[in-house]
Amino acid sequence: MEIDRIGHTRMRFVDDEGGFTTPAIALAILLACSLIFISARGAIIGSRSGQIQYVADAGALAADNIVAEFVTIGQIVDAVLLSMSLLGLSVYAVSAVAAFIPGAQNAAAKIAQAGSKILQARDKFAETATKGLNTAQKALPAICAVRAFEVINANASASGIPYAGAAITSPIMGAEVSLADDSEVEEAAEEIESKHGDIQEKSVQAQDAQNRENDAKHRAWMADCGNAGMSMFERAGHLSDISAANNPHYSSADAWNFSIPLERAEAYYAARYYAEAGSGASGSPDTIAESVARKQFYAYARDEVSQGYVETTDTGAQIPHLVQLARNTEQIRSTSLYTDAIYPISSSNGTRTIHAYAGCPGYSSGSPSGYGSVSEVDSGLVHICEHCRFSATTLGRVPSASTSIDNGFEYYYLAVVEASKDYAQAVEDGEDAKRHLKESRESIGNSLHEALKALAAKRYDPQPPGRYGCICVVIAPNTQLKDTPFIDGSASIPARVAISGATLAADPADDEGNIISDIAQGLVPSENLGSGLLKLVFGAWGSMLKAYTDGTEGIKQGLDKLLGAIPIVGNTLSEQATQNFKNALSDAGLEPADLKSYKPVIVNTSRIIERDGGKAAQIIGHMKQAAAMYSAVSIGDIGALIEDIEAVPEIQELLDEHGLTIAEIPLSDLGVGNGSKKLYLPVPMDISSRLEELHSLLLSTAAE
């Protein structure tokens, strides 16, 4: 800086007029370019240095994605096991419904056989799934490490930086897979099948009883009021002054019951009794005696008929107990008409004579000698009056004629009584059979209920290695920045390490249940099912798989679909069985499954390490501290970290070009093919060699 002669300050490189000189502009440009080059160099070096963290993130996500695939497969296994148990159980329930249909025993047996095949296939699926899942869990640390290794290698190739790394599952071990047995379902199936014969026998008995019951009721209705000609209804109206209210007519047996003829008979005999003159009749003594006999018979019939009743059982069935009337002299001798001492007796010259009424000429010719019964005539204690000639025969003639020929009321009443006995016996036989069937329904319903409760408690919840997360460690050696703009070719980025963690986060998806159902249902290809019973049965599998998402409602829909698909025609008994079994399903309260899908997300590794107190977690914690303090990790830590990641020898027998076989359904056992349908976890075929490559590269890179 200079001071001019008048005291003004002057800047070098600035002329007197205040402008920049050429050297000043050149210097400014040089400084700006230097800043740009320095910034670009820093950005390039920083970008190349920080890129390793993205590689670690990608490796952690790739490893944890394998865990997510395992969990999804576990959900599918659970869905298949549950749905096949439910399907087999429901098929057995349908076989029981068929057994309740008389004549459907063969159909019930065939349906039960289909149920047996399903449960057998379920057991084999469970057996293979147990082996496959356990093998997969043992191999999962190696699979996750190799998957992360593949992603790290791909990034190394793309960037030209020789990254090396591995992913560690946390925890390193999974909970042993022990899929629950199907014992309660099999017990319920055995009970159902064991009851088929008894159910069928009792169903036939119940059907036979129902047929006899219907026939007896129809015969009784015809005799009472169903005949177009004579009947109790027609005879009562013709022979007495009974009111229309006491003499109703029914045009169908459906609305008719045995109380109607009972009440009709009571009203009829009461009307006949009051209309009969008896001892007040006119005519010859024997004519009057006939009227007395009729009046006494009507009184007896009224009293006897009134002793009848219709019993209603606890089940609502009606059992008639109608009283049969004496129909001839022989039967009169067993009634009160024969033994009632109500007839006047006269005595003359030591001879006692019985009379029909006190106005009999024979009675007035002797001396009154009390009252007696017609039974005394047969015992020789009294004699028959020669005028009225009253005896048991007189009483017997009243019902004899009207019961023996079809123009008498008693003829039709007797037909009703006889039909009522057949009806009562049929109802009792039917009630007995229905009681046995009800006990069978309830027993089967209880077994279904217990089996469903057991299924609800025996669900597979995957707990694989890596259930807390996966931690990926990536190492990059000292790297020269060759052919990098603005940077000297001899410059390099020092060795560095990055650690990243990923864990599974719930991702509720509306279509997850459908995905699981679709995969599970695909295990039995519909094109192999033909057109037989199994096709009908497995047509309902989709509905049973809905139990995985819809709980009990899915089972009900499946049961309805089965009942609709299997060609059996039900009756009241089978409908009751169906409802009983549906009630058992409702009471079991099978809850819908948790169908959240799980996807890997990046998290702070401390969240994973805190949950896992194992050896690997401790090593990674130490590595984090070393990396933070020294920007490096020891080869000893790296070696200790990966020494437990080993290939599982038994994995080879379950590997093919599709991956690791987790489970399979033997289609041949179901009768729908010769092979099997498998469920796979994607696994590299060369996993052992890839794992060796991982070990070698990681250790050599860490040593640089």
Image (cartoon, grey):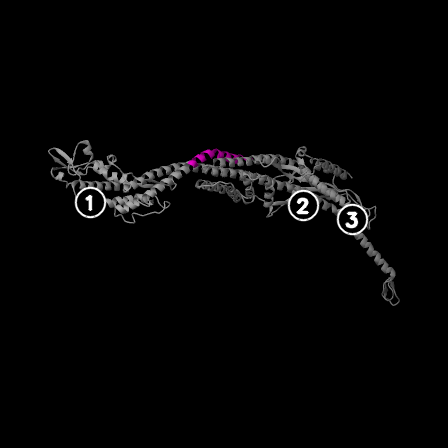
Q: Mark 2 = which residue? A: 604
Q: Nearer the viewer, residue 285 or 261?
A: 285
- Corner quadrant of residue 171: top right
Residue at 23% x, 38% y is 397
Residue 127 is inside the magenta segment: no
**Residue 178 seen by the camera:** no
Read off the magenta span: 181-204
Q: Distance between the residues labelled 2 and 3?
A: 25 Å
Q: Nearer the viewer, residue 14 or 598?
A: 598
Dot 3 falls on a residue whose secondary structure is helix
Name the amino acid type tagged 3.
Ile
Dot 1 falls on a residue whose secondary structure is loop
Label 3 crowd bin: few (<14), some (14–19), many (20+), radius 10 Å: some
Residue 189 is inside the magenta segment: yes
Spot occupied by residue 60 in the image (x, y as percentages of width and height): 69, 43
Q: Mark 3 = which residue? A: 45
Spot occupied by residue 420 in the image (x, y as percentages of width and height): 33, 39
Q: Mark 1 = which residue? A: 277
Spot occupied by residue 207 in the image (x, y as percentages of width and height): 42, 38
- Corner quadrant of residue 545: top right
Spot occupied by residue 346 in the image (x, y as percentages of width and height): 13, 37
